[in-house]
Amino acid sequence: MSSLTNESFEFGTYTEITDFAFEVKPSYKNEGFVRFFICCDTWDFWFVRILEGYNEDYEQENSFILERNKIRKSFKGENLSLSKVKDIIQEDDGSNWDMQVSNDIDELIEMLDEGFGIINLKTVKTEDENDTIPNNQ
């Protein structure tokens, strides 16, 4: 069950929504997607999918594609809520506005972060219980 709430979203900051996306649309797992993020901007929402196993030409390769889709807001002051995120996921047709490719998923996530942090970023415990690393699963 996802730990997201309506308070999980901040203007101009990405929030990881991977667990919620898989709950809403389980077929994403079969399509090779491994991580999902969303961000509220002034005029748009940015919906991000990370696809594992493909290059920039969507040919099978040992790399990752970060696909970013720009979704126009209904009005300038529209905020993100769980119901809005659910609608975006359900209406996702797989199109994208731009994409980045890397052999390193962490590099793509850092590029997305741009130093502002990512809310709800998934982490996993290492063998040393005090260390955490980004979850690339």
Image (cartoon, rainbow, N blue to C red):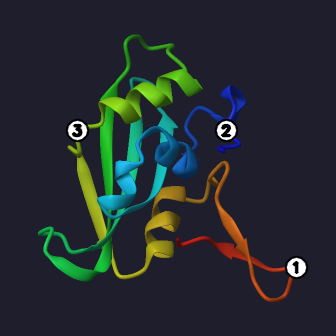
Mark 1: which amino acid?
Asn
**Quick check: marks 1 and 2 in contact, CB under 8 Å?**
no
Q: Which of pointers 3 and 2 lies earlier in the amino acid sequence?
A: 2
Q: Could you tell me residue 55's position as x and y percent?
A: 20, 74
Residue at point 31%, 36% (across, down): 70
Residue at 36%, 31% in the rendered image: 90
Tell me where residue 39 appears, x and y as whole percent: 50, 39
Q: Secondary structure at mark 2?
A: loop
Residues at discs 3 and 2 in contact (Cβ within 8 Å): no
The mark closer to the camera, 1 or 3, is 3
The residue positioned farthest toward the right in the image shown: 130
Q: Earlier in the sequence, mark 1 or mark 3?
A: 3
Quadrant (top left, top right, bottom left, bottom right) of the N terminus = top right
Between 40 and 131, the one nearer to me in the picture: 131
- Mark 1, Cα crowd under 10 Å, few <14 / some 14-19 / many 20+, is few
Q: Is residue 18 above or below residue 54?
A: above
Which callout, 1 or 2, points to the residue nearer the camera? 2
User: Furthest-bottom residue in view?
Assistant: 127
State the image quarter where residue 81 is shown. Answer: top right
**Residue 51: x %, y % from top left:** 33, 64
At numbered mark 1, what does the secondary structure look like: helix, strand or loop? loop
Residue named by callout 2: 4
Cα gap from disc 1 to disc 3, whole angstroms: 40 Å
Name the amino acid, label 3. Asp
Q: Are marks 1 and 3 in contact (CB under 8 Å)?
A: no
Q: Which residue is mark 3?
A: 93
Other residues around mark 3 within 10 Å, as few (<14) / some (14–19) / many (≥20): few
Identify the residue under disc 1.
130
* N-term-proximal mark, 1 vs 2: 2
Q: Is residue 71 above or below residue 73?
A: below
